[in-house]
Image: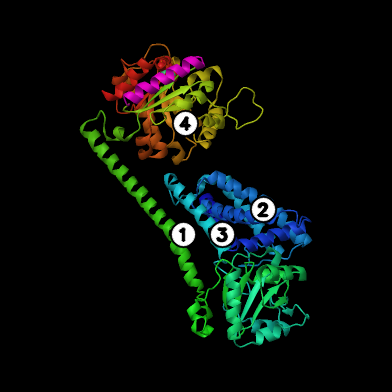
Amino acid sequence: MKKTLVNTCRIVLAIVFILSGFVKAVDPLGTQYKIQDYLEAMKLGGVVPDILTLTASVAQSALEFCLGIFLLFAIQRRLTSRLITAIMLVMTPLTLWLALANPISDCGCFGDALVLTNWQTFWKNAVLLVCALIVTRWPREMFRFVSESNQWIVINYSILFILAISGWSLYDLPQFDFRPYHIGTNLRENWERTMDGEDLPYADFFIERADDREDITETVLQDTGYVFLLVSPYLEQADDSRLDLINELYEYCHDHGYPFYCLTASTENAMTQWRDRTGAEYPYSLTDGTTLKTIIRSNPGLLLLKDGYIIRKWSHNNLPQIEESLTVLPLEQLPVGQMAANSIPGRIAKLLMWFVLPLALLSIADRTWRWTRLIRRKTRKERHLENSKVNPNPINNNNKKMRKKIVAGNWKMNMNLQDGIALAKELNETLKADKPNCGVVICTPFIHLASIAQFLDQEIIGLGAENCADKEKGAFTGEVSAEMVKSTGAQYVILGHSERREYYKETPEILKEKVLLAQKNDLKVIFCIGESLEEREAGKQNEVVKAELEGSVFNLSEEDFRKIVIAYEPIWAIGTGKTATAEQAEEIHAYIRSIIAEKYGQAVADDTTILYGGSCKASNAPELFAKPDIDGGLIGGASLKAADFKGIVDAWKK
Ligand code: PEP
């Protein structure tokens, strides 16, 4: 029930954000005009430069589109849903204000594709806010279409795609034209119907001769032949880099008797300057500035009418050029004079081809890969069960081979900075020269981390902290947060060590918080569990480790639990020189694996790395590591000398 609710909300939000971002990206200038309308309504018109409003327009469309895609693919579920909630928390009251004060007629959330009233927008946002809160409350309930390892493809592709759409629409014209002046519109008929009193969006369309202010709208629209309209809302801001093409086209029109008008809302002064600058000979006519911006998203832009129909539109970057040898021909015989191919299904098909199809194929490939991996694991497990029937104590069985082996050092509160750096350097050189057969990690005091991270080859030796705070940030003097640990370059953190449980009274609840924060900051947790001597003597070791797992890590989703490394450390063996025998250790490791299997299934249990810790040395490591459920060690005392530690690492070579 909860899953269905969260995923329904997530799909609704994703679709709305994707659509809203996309329609804005196909018309960046339209979105910029809307932002300027908002600024005007806030009495800030003219204060913000155009370049900033245009950048804001492109950024807003990209943000909305990408958040929609990330939510759809459940990428960074927690962060994405929080960002969407933050946006809705700002937008909902803002649109309530718009609905109450009515400073602008429509909010422009879907560009010109879908115009909503201010109240409709407010109610839409209220519903989306509720959806966003639900998704933020349970982000982990969202199922994935693409596994985490492949998400970078979706992220980069979506960002590139939406920026390319905005860029192309700015260079040329909007790829989808939802405005009342799109290609194929019968401008004459629509204008006449508006004049007859119908409520159509052409009421502000007029053409007035600049010299004598005579209204010539009807004359222009009644023309049954070709009419060129050069549209420039404000000539002083128009791009004049393609003037030669405009002038050549005007000459061609002049020679063939096609009317050519320059429609503008500029002042007389600006018209004179444009004429002086460009040598323009075409006549000027006046039109409403906002209408001109609506007609074409280019300054200047060119429109071709034929018999009252808009048959072509060009941006100033893509003006038509008629080859000299063809200038004798009339427009009927030239491609320029034909109605532009403007098939919406064709454009949608292109969009599907370039964006939806690649991502759909990626999802299918990813899901198939995951599914076959599950099958492979299942087969492996069945084979393992078969094997264990034949040989009940198989060493280095298949499952063990598949698991990650780790030898991790825990330096505890030893080594000053200089000694620590020297030890890390020595280990780095040694293991670079003689590559280990297992993962190697060193967990050091906080103050060593940043310095060691500078030179450590983390392909060979991972770096980790010995602890982190159970709070995200703030007034907690002396504490070090997971985020801080991560920022040093460390990848791991030890949590739940018996010394911290005992001396610093770290309870299962505190550890649960620490684990969540560590994972939130992408730190791999080495989670320690283990019983005291009294508990072992009372035969309670299984009970103790089970409670420790249940108290702090069994709350995690399967996906997050898979990122945990368990370290079983009997407290009576830590630093005492008393090692658990290999059989004792194996017995409890096998038990730990069985309770993980009960909780998360056999496949997860088979993949979980379980380390042994407690007076592990080069001399006893081979025997311990040979056991089927022991995947390496967490090493205290013996990690303080490079040679001792290397001896344990080398146990995996035996
Ligand atoms: C430890 O503290 O994690 C540990 C295993 O210590 P030692 O190896 O010194 O027993």
Cα–Cα span, label 1 and label 4: 34 Å
Q: Earlier in the sequence, mark 1 or mark 4?
A: 1
Q: Earlier in the sequence, mark 3 or mark 1?
A: 3
Task: Please give the residue where the numbered disc 2 appears in the rendered image.
Answer: 52
* Residue 283 in magenta stretch: no
Q: What secondary structure characterizes most of the magenta part?
A: helix
Say which of 647 and 261 sits in front: 261
Residue 216 position in % (x across, y down): 72, 83
Mark 2: which secondary structure? helix
Q: Earlier in the sequence, mark 1 or mark 2?
A: 2
Q: Which mark is residue 355?
A: 1
Q: How many marks?
A: 4
Q: Which mark is residue 166?
A: 3
What kind of residue is marked 2? Leu
Which image quarter: residue 31?
A: bottom right
**Circle 1 Cα neighbour tier, 10 Å, few/some/many (<14 / 14–19 / ≥20):** some
Q: Nearer the viewer, mark 4 or mark 3?
A: 3
Q: Nearer the viewer, mark 2 or mark 4?
A: 2
Q: Nearer the viewer, mark 3 or mark 1?
A: 3
Mark 1: which secondary structure? helix
Q: Earlier in the sequence, mark 2 or mark 4?
A: 2
Cα–Cα span, label 4 and label 3: 38 Å
Q: In the displayed structure, would residue 499 be above or below residue 519?
A: above
Question: For ligand 1, which image quadrant applies?
Answer: top left
Residue 344 position in % (x across, y down): 51, 72
Q: Which residue is pictured at 68% across the width and 71% down the height? A: 292
- Report the span colored magenta: 414-435
